[in-house]
Each structure stands twice: as structure tokens, then as C-alpha cells.
Amino acid sequence: MKDKILLKENLVSFGNSLIEQYRLIAPVKSNGFSLYKPVGNASEICLDYLRPLKSAKEIFFPQNETLFFFNKKTQKIAEPAYDKKPTILFGAVACDLAGIAAQDRLFSAGAYLDSYYLKRRRNSILIGMACPEPGEMCFCGFFGIDRFASDIADLFFTPFSDKYYIKVNTEAGARLVESLPDAAAADAKTVERLRCENAEPKWDIPPLDELARMLAEGFEADVWDEIAQKCIGCAACTFVCPTCHCFDITDEAKGEIGRRVRTWDGCMFPKFTLHASGHNPRTKGGQRMRQRILHKFSYFKDNQGVVSCTGCGRCAEICPVNVDIREVLKQLGEACERKS
Amino acid sequence: MDIQSEIQKIAARLLKNKEVAMVIGYGAGSAPNRTAPVFIDKEKDVGKLVFNRFCVNNLSLYLPRLKEKGKIAIVAKPCDVRTIVCLIQEKQIERDKVHIISFACPGLLEKDGKTLFASCAECAVTLPPVYDTLSGEAKEMERNEPFTDRVADFFSKMPAERWEMFKAEMEKCIRCYACRNACPMCYCEECFVERSLPRWIGEGSEVTDTMIFHIVRAIHTAGRCGECGACARACPMDVNLAPLAKQIREDMLNLFHHQAGVDPNAPAALETFKPDDYNDFIK
Ligand code: SF4
Ligand code: SF4
Ligand code: SF4
Ligand code: SF4
Ligand code: SF4
């Protein structure tokens, strides 16, 4: 499969050629910030933002999704309508693609196949886009995520001068760019140089293997209460996160007729773990903060083989009280050092 | 002396003399143009207190949950003081258990470091209604030009258009509840949105449910909202929450002659009635 070149000035016509056959989702400017949204015309695509405010996860795992409709009287259930048109996610940044990779592991892990997720995900094509400059809250480099490539993307775009270099990863991707000119060896070199010039800075966060040890040792540490003291227990951080996947299932009915819905939930809500008995095993903010961090850096890794943080920095960006996950990890490291 | 140095000095004195157990204030944020709440209980740590135009939180939300620590000093903007007054009126905290460190407010800036927050541009109070220590000098706030009064703008529209505007705002909401949780007056241990027996509203992001959440929250803060704007600043989706809150504040003033957060000795709006009320059902 040959890599391709697209002139920036041809982006809109390229995008519009996709819209005929696919549901195209791309970053658009909406109310002064960027969001991944379905586009009717490729001219709506807006790439001058760092990364969309919300992650791309809702394309495959919507915040609110009808699982089925029911009628208690007739004892019948009905599946909701599903648009079979395949989806192209265009302009996904590397941290979001890593997020989708984590979601893929979870929703198709072993015996637990999530048909709702998979029917959307399997009917999709991912087109990545390099971030030229990380934002002030970004730390994807800490996880070794390459801003200029992604295995999970069918195609990956890197902007340089007046062009996009298109790395072709799959047959499905290749078919979309068939008619575009091949990339020259010099173009590949330019992109490689860009990537080297943009090598990641050093992070003053404990390295991942050390973190794993700290998390295991620090389960009962007082530092969790310290970290969580300012947290106000909203779920903004989990809702914007590309890897958070917790949900709740409820019935919404009027009389005998209704629907069963699944809705995003988040471990930072104090009621997240409230049992039907009235008992709540996580009553303290520190316990909830610990759950969020341990799930990302310890449990998910144990169960799925990767950490479930991609360093997108969104949680830090939107937290109303500036709980910055990088600081949290640092604080944890310091607390462990104090102890030993 | 600048406000930050004065705050640090006052905090140091209060902690040194053991007048308070803790000072809640603003500390440095993790990126430029941000701050984060800090909780200081040692005199040596008062250097962590900062003051700048990015002190966006209303810290009084932490007062009720920390009251078992004893007397607490709090760095509070004049609008934040209004919610402290409401918390006192509603017996969530006691007046003599809180030391209010306030100042003449210069107004807050958005993260761009230039634009005055809409809630601050609309604010008429640059001095706190009550305080224990006060820093700075009251000045006329420098407003953005051109200044649009979002509330007046909203209410100048015809109902159908208003409905569309409201709906468009509500469609932005992701129901993260940061607005509610950032609000000192939303201190209910169980919010109606989380009740499951019976369930009041659907859990998801359906716009009608979202509307009910915001309308009920606005009504629940009637006569209690200090108009600090912390809810709107906490919102990650930039939902314009002002028109609802502001109109209710105006209704409270016009219909009940009640202004939230002015006098800690006055009764709370919702716990009083007047024998000469113009509504018949009250008699
Ligand atoms: S935890 Fe925060 S930084 Fe990590 S992936 Fe989620 S939103 Fe991004
Ligand atoms: S437990 Fe918390 S951190 Fe883990 S996926 Fe759920 S919401 Fe995210
Ligand atoms: S966004 Fe911030 S305040 Fe809200 S739950 Fe997450 S860490 Fe806590
Ligand atoms: S509703 Fe908003 S403006 Fe009113 S007191 Fe609460 S946070 Fe402040
Ligand atoms: S903070 Fe904003 S997005 Fe979150 S619930 Fe409130 S209005 Fe909705």
C-alpha cells in the first residue's frame, strides 16, 4: 500500500467525495470550541483547534443510547432503528485513537462482546490527524503515544507545507485515497523530520512501572484525601475522557410502554456506587479519586493490558477546580517517596 | 500593599493566633491563567495563597463540609460573600465560625487573560455586603466593549425565539453537574436528579430532561442565588445559565422585595411570609 498526498486546498472536495457514501464525522467549530460532529459539507471541518473539547468516544458509545423499546402489555421488545451507512471519523487526534483502541479492548474483550458498540465500530473507518503542537495540558508523550502515527487508524494525515502526507494503514483506507497521487520519498523524509523535531519533552511524573508499584503500595495512603479535597464530585472529567466507559442502565416508561437506556455514568459522582441496600462503599472523595486513578493506571492495565489514560489532558482542561491528573500522579509519587 | 500580600498577611496572623483552624483560598493553578482551591492549616504555608483575576471558584461551597474543623477563614470575592450570607441564613454555617477575608473585586478574566467574564461584566457589587477583613480599594470595573447584557438581550426576544435560544443552550449540556456541584447553594445531600424512587427525570442527555434539571435548579436557588457566576464558569460546555438565574433574582426583588445574600440576620426568603401578602392563599 502506497502512502498518498493530498493538497490542503483539495481537502473540502476530498471530504465531500466521502459524504456521498459515508456518515462523515469530523472536528467542527461549535459555540466557540471544537467538537466531533457529523458534517453535511466538508467545508464545515475546522482543523485549527488543538483537540476537540470532548473525545471521540461517543461516536461508538453514545452518552445516551436506547437498547430496546418494550411493551409490558404485549410482552414484546423492539430494537431501535440503526443507520447502516458506514461512518468515517476524520481528523481524530492520536490520543483519541489510542482511546478508541482502549475501548475496543474493553468492549470486545474475551467473552464480553458489546454488540451495541461493535455494530458501530465495525462499520467505521478511522482517519487520524497529527497534532503539530501539544497543548498546555497534553501529555500523550508520557505514554509513548506518537502524535504523528497510529496503528489503529485506517489512514493517518500529517500536515506539512501546503499538503497532507497520508499514511495508508489498511485496505479499507487505501480504497478511499486510490485516486490521489503517491507520496514521494522526499515527502516521507519531511514527515519523519517533523516527527523528530517534535520529540516529546521529559515528564516529571513517575514512570509507568514505578507508578504501578506506588499505586499498589499507596492504596491506603492519606494522600488520596489530600488530592481529593478540592474535587467537587462532578463527572466532567470522566465524561470528556476518551477511555472512561462506565454506564448505568435504566428504564424510562410511560405506563406499559417504554425504553431501556444506557447512559454514561462516572466514578466521581458520589452516588456511583450506592447500593440498593443504601450502603455506599465509597463515601469519601479520596476513595473516589483513588478509584479513578487506579482504574486507569492499574485495574485496566491488569485486565486489558494497557493503561486507560492517553494523556489527552481533557480532564485537567475542563476540571472546574483544576484537578490536573499530571499533578495527581506527581503528588502520589511524592507521597510514596516521603513514606519510603 | 497588593491584595495577594494582604491576604497572605491576614492568613498568617489568623493561623498564628489560632483564631482559625484553616484558611480556604486560591493557590497557583497547573497552567497559566488558572488557580486552584487550597486549604491551608499551617502558618508556614500561607505563601501558597495567590490572588489574581483567575480566581474563578466560589470557595464558600467548601464551608459546610469543613465546619467540623472549627472556625474557618475564607478568601471570598464580594459575590461569593453573598452566598456565605445565604449559607448563614440557612443555618448551614454560623457567622462566628467563619472569618471572611474579602476585598474590592477587580473582576475576573477568562482564560484568554483579556475578556472580563460575562457574570463580572454584569456585576454591580464590587464591595462585599459583610466581611471581617477587607483589602483593596473599590474602583469602577473596566467593562468589555461592546458590552451585551445577555439577560436583557434574552428577554427582549419574542417567546418563540426565547424558547429556541433556551433549547440551543440546553442541547449543549452534557449533564456533568459541574454547575450544580460548583454552586455553594446546591448543598442538598440528595439532588432530585439522582432520586430513583421515584425517578423525577431521565438520566441521560435528552434535552427535555436537561431542561427540567436546569429549571428546577433555578427555582431551587430562587432568593438564594448570590449571582456569583461560579456555576457558569464551572461549565465545560459554556452553557449560558445566566438568564434563568438573573430573571428569578429580579422576580424575587420585584415580587418579594428580597435580595439574596445581603443581610445575614434577615430570614431566608423561603422561610418567611408576610401577613399582608397580596396572595390570598397565604392568609
Ligand atoms: S484521564 Fe484525563 S488525560 Fe487521561 S485520557 Fe482521560 S481525560 Fe485524557
Ligand atoms: S471507573 Fe471511573 S475512571 Fe474507570 S472508566 Fe469508570 S468513570 Fe472512568
Ligand atoms: S472534573 Fe474535577 S471536580 Fe469534577 S469530578 Fe473530576 S476532578 Fe473532581
Ligand atoms: S446558582 Fe450559580 S450564580 Fe447562583 S449562587 Fe449558585 S453558583 Fe452562584
Ligand atoms: S456544568 Fe454545564 S454541561 Fe455540566 S450539567 Fe451544568 S450546564 Fe450542563
Image (cartoon, rainbow, N blue to C red):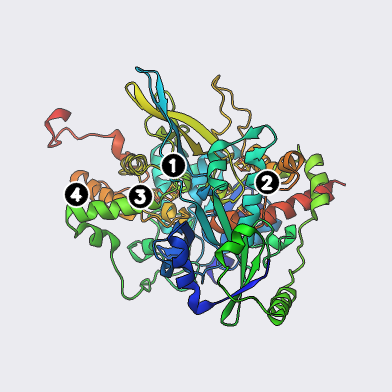
Q: Secondary structure at mark 1?
A: loop
> Which is nearer the eye, B246 or A260?
A260
Which mark identifies residue A269?
none
Taking B127 as reference, is A82 above or below it?
above
* Alpha-carbon span between mark 1 and mark 2: 46 Å
Question: What type is the residue that disc 3 sits on?
Answer: Met
Q: Give the quarter of the figure containing the N terminus of chain A.
A: bottom right
**Mark 4–mark 2 CB contact (< 8 Å):** no
Of badges 3 and 4, the one in the foreground is: 3
The residue mark sitting in front, 3 or 1, is 1
Residue at numbered disc 2:
A226
Q: Is mark 4 within 8 Å of ligand 4?
A: no
Residue under circle 4?
B254
Mark 3: which secondary structure?
helix
Q: Nearer the viewer, residue A19 or A252?
A: A19
Whether residue B71 sits left or right of residue B246 in the image: it is: right
Q: Which mark is residue A82?
A: 1
For the residues bearing labels 3 and 1, Cβ distance under 8 angstroms = no
**Disc 2 beta carbon < 8 A from ligand 3?**
no
| Residue A18 left/right relative to A288 | left
Task: Name the residue carrying label 3.
Answer: B170
Mark 3 in CB contact with mark 4 (< 8 angstroms):
no
Label 1 is placed on what type of residue? Tyr
